[in-house]
Image: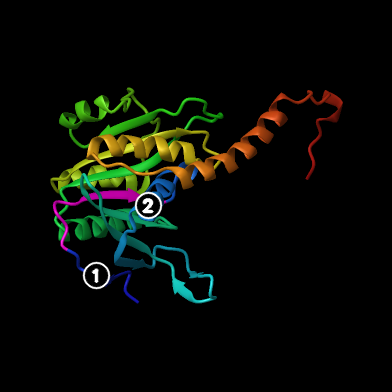
């Protein structure tokens, strides 16, 4: 196969759609948020993107049928805006691949008439989060006020080290192509799948794009993760281990 191949699955008419990127990343925040949108609004699959930058594997469904791993675009209609939701199980395996693949994603978005984009993701705190804050970055300073009004925080030099992967390039490459692009990053511990952080990101999108979504299924997942968090806290608050018992085990 070619390095990148696109399957055209459907061609719905969308009204000024907004690109929503939710590929895997820290806490799976963006992926959880994107998948929740698809679940709640019954998104229509419109494109599959295959690339040799993804791992050499197939995904197997509940019936045992295999499909070459890919990224997918779904068309979603909400009361406030039409969305073009991008998600999948992988990101590119090389620096060049990130650039090439993001360029392809933006090509598809332009094909559907999108001029705005929101990349969704998480920013690690290194500790369990009590209050979920969403950090923002934008392709143009004129976009800050609208997001700040939706309680998005803009902090100097955060996230440290910048934004890597597709989420960062949606802003960088998107700006060069005339997209109004923003990245919404929910604070998360960085070592757990985080449905609560995903909800915090979605609540910003709700306000900015003027739609409403039910969170019941995401809350169920959050309750499951709370059990895990509770066990972690118990371990953290447990009795200290005597120095004599601290040994390297190899």
Residue 207 image point, x, y percent: 27, 34
Residue at x 37%, y 52% (from the top left corner)? 40
* Front tag of 1 and 2: 2
Residue at x 69%, y 27% (from the top left corner)? 236
Q: Is residue 12 visible?
A: yes
Q: Which residue is mark 2?
A: 40
Residue at x 23%, y 39% (from the top left corner)? 210
Residue 49 image point, x, y percent: 32, 66
Q: Decide which of 229, 241 is in the foreground and name it.
A: 229
Q: Is residue 43 found left or right of 129 in the rendered image?
A: left
Is residue 185 located in the magenta-colored stretch of the structure?
A: no
When asked about the image quadrant of residue 200, the answer is top left
Tell me if mark 2 has few (under 14), some (14-19) or many (20+) residues whose alpha carbon lies within 10 angstroms of its own. Answer: some
Q: Decide which of 246, 48 is in the foreground and name it.
A: 48
- Which quadrant does the N terminus fall into? bottom left
Residue 126 image point, x, y percent: 54, 30
Q: Residue furthest right?
A: 244
The circle drawn on residue 10 is 1
- Which quadrant does the C terminus fall into? top right
Q: Is residue 115 found left or right of 85 in the rendered image?
A: left
Give the magenta part as a residue range. 13-23
The circle drawn on residue 236 is none
Disc 1 on helix, strand or loop? loop
């Amino acid at each position: 196969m070619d390095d990148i191949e696109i399957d055209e699955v459907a061609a719905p008419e969308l009204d000024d759609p907004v690109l929503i990127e939710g590929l895997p990343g820290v806490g799976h925040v963006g992926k959880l948020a994107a998948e929740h949108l698809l679940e709640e609004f019954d998104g229509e699959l419109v494109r599959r993107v295959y690339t040799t930058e993804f791992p050499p594997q197939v995904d197997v469904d509940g019936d045992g049928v295999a499909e070459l791993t890919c990224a997918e675009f779904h068309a979603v209609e909400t009361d406030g805006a039409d969305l073009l939701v991008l998600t999948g199980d992988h990101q590119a395996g090389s620096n060049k691949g990130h650039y090439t693949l993001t360029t392809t994603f933006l090509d598809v978005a332009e094909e559907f008439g999108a001029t705005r984009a929101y990349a969704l993701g998480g920013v690690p705190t290194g500790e369990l989060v009590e209050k979920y804050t969403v950090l923002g970055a934008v392709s143009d300073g004129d976009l800050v006020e609208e997001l700040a009004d939706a309680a998005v925080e803009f902090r100097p030099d955060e996230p440290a080290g910048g934004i890597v992967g597709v989420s960062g390039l949606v802003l960088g490459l998107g700006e060069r192509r005339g997209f109004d692009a923003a990245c919404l990053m929910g604070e998360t511990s960085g070592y757990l799948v985080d449905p609560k952080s995903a909800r915090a990101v979605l609540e910003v999108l709700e306000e900015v794009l003027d739609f409403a979504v039910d969170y019941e299924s995401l809350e169920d997942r959050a309750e499951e993760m709370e059990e895990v968090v509770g066990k972690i806290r118990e371990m953290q608050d447990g009795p200290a281990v005597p120095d004599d018992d601290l040994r390297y085990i190899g």
